[in-house]
Image: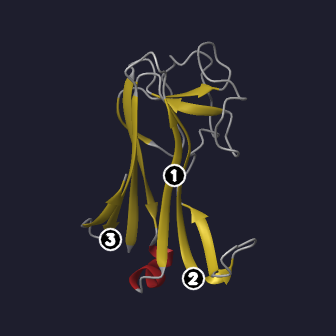
């Protein structure tokens, strides 16, 4: 069994919106493919755009964030347009949810999730799978914000195969 461990860390009033890890494998025609290659893509991130669950109007409420395991601090899902935060019209992912992630009231937080890729095992083992890690990351220019995203690829027994940041 193959699995992919995905991690996101946040601090200050930075924003993480629209996190995507696409696995692309040969096999079926991708609609609108400009390359003419046979591909099929799937996003492995659950709730990468903070669109599932509640959002806080002030960025201070501690909350459970569906799809993610909190490892430090109190990350928050902040509603677009909350006072002092980006509006829905602020540049961002086209498929954005109702909110974006921040470091929450503690100002520093981290969370992660694990995605099971065992259904693509044969294609992965044959080297026919590629990935793309992307996300909309930001912060406030007047603060010492930082945000990091990483994907770690592991075997079923937990050995690290590789990582992306």
Examine the rendered structure and indicate whether residue 30 appears above or below residue 57. below
Examine the rendered structure and indicate whether residue 134 appears above or below residue 160. above
Whether residue 9 is visible: no
Q: Position of residue 88 (x, y in %)?
A: 71, 29
- Between label 3 and label 2, give the one nearer the viewer: 2
> Under tag 1, what secondary structure?
strand
Q: Image point 32% across, 70% down: which residue?
A: 156
Mark with earlier residue (3, 1): 1
Q: CA distance from mark 2 to mark 1?
A: 21 Å
Q: Position of residue 53 (x, y in %)?
A: 62, 36
> Under tag 2, what secondary structure?
strand
Instruction: Write down the quadrant of residue 79 in the picture.
Output: top right
For the residue carrying disc 2, how many other residues have a C-alpha within 10 Å: few (<14), some (14-19), or many (20+)?
some
Instruction: Write down the quadrant of residue 125 in the picture.
Output: bottom left
> Under tag 3, what secondary structure?
loop
Q: CA distance from mark 3 to mark 2?
A: 22 Å
Q: CA distance from mark 3 to mark 1?
A: 24 Å
- Between label 3 and label 1, give the one nearer the viewer: 1
Q: Image point 44% across, 17% down: which residue?
A: 105
Image check: 56 left or right of 4?
A: right
Image check: 86 left or right of 32?
A: left
Whether residue 18 is visible: yes
The residue labelled by disc 2 is 26
The residue labelled by disc 3 is 156
Task: Return the mark for residue 23.
Answer: none
The residue labelled by disc 1 is 134
Examine the rendered structure and indicate whether residue 96 appears above or below residue 21. above
């Amino acid at each position: 069994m193959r699995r992919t461990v995905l991690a996101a860390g946040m601090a200050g009033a930075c924003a993480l919106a629209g996190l995507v890890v696409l696995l692309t494998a040969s096999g079926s025609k991708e609609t609108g493919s400009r390359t003419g290659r046979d591909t099929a893509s799937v996003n492995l991130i659950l709730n990468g755009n903070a669109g599932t669950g509640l959002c806080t109007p002030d960025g201070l409420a501690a909350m459970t964030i569906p799809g993610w395991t909190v490892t430090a601090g109190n990350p928050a899902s902040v509603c677009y347009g909350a006072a002092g935060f980006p509006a829905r019209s602020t540049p961002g992912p086209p498929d954005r949810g109702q909110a974006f992630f921040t470091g929450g009231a503690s100002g520093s937080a981290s969370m992660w999730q694990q995605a099971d890729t065992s259904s693509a095992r044969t294609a992965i083992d044959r080297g026919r799978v590629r990935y793309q890690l992307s996300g909309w990351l930001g912060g406030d220019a007047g603060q010492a914000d930082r945000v990091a995203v990483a994907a770690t690829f592991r075997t079923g027994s937990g050995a690290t195969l590789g990582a992306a940041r």
